[in-house]
Image (cartoon, rainbow, N blue to C red):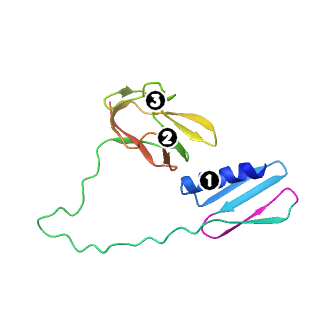
Amino acid sequence: MDLKDIKAIIDLMKKNSISEFELEKEEFKIRLKRGGNGISVGEDGLPVTYTLAQPTAMTTQQIGPATAGTPAATPAPVGAEIKSPMIGTFYRTPSPESASYVEIGTEVGPESVVCIIEAMKVMNEIKAEARGVITEILIDNAKPVEFGQPLFRIRPL
């Protein structure tokens, strides 16, 4: 693994808000950790330190108790979800000039491909794994997704 590959991994970590990454391959092991110092061990067994930018502090806004005239919470969405099995970039089409795999109202089966998630330059077809009708597309094309993040909502048949 060369420096270009390590920089690509760091960029992927930043783009997808990944806090920790570890790769072990034959005699090579690297571990990267965001938000502080990540210590990795190179091929020669010596520790190598990478320092990544600290995430900016988030502020929270205090919300008062709900009044009688406003609902306390929004109702939960109806239907099952197709979730991302990995971290990567979500694509609705097999190529830029192709039509989308599915649209709202498309009937899918367990083996139906609904999208592609690109991870480390590998295109992974994601299947519905359930029978139903697509009722909602929750991610915009070419946007990063996290493991377990809902991609589609389907109404079971």
Disc 2 to disc 1, how far (Cα)?
17 Å
Q: Nearer the viewer, mark 2 or mark 1?
A: 1
Q: Secondary structure at mark 2?
A: strand
Residue at left 60%, top 66%? 53
In the rendered image, residue 33, in percent from the top left (x then y), is placed at 65, 63
Give whichever of discs 2 and 3 has the lower sequence position.
Answer: 2
**Res 90 label:** 2
Q: Is residue 103 left or right of residue 87?
A: left
12 or 123, nearer to the observer: 12
Query: Which residues make up the magenta segment?
Result: 34-44
107 or 50, nearer to the observer: 50
The kind of residue tagged 1 is Asp
Give whichever of discs 3 and 1 has the lower sequence position.
Answer: 1
Determine which residue is flagged by label 1: 11
Q: Secondary structure at mark 3?
A: loop
Determine which residue is flagged by label 3: 110
Q: Residue furthest left?
A: 69
Residue at left 30%, top 75%? 62
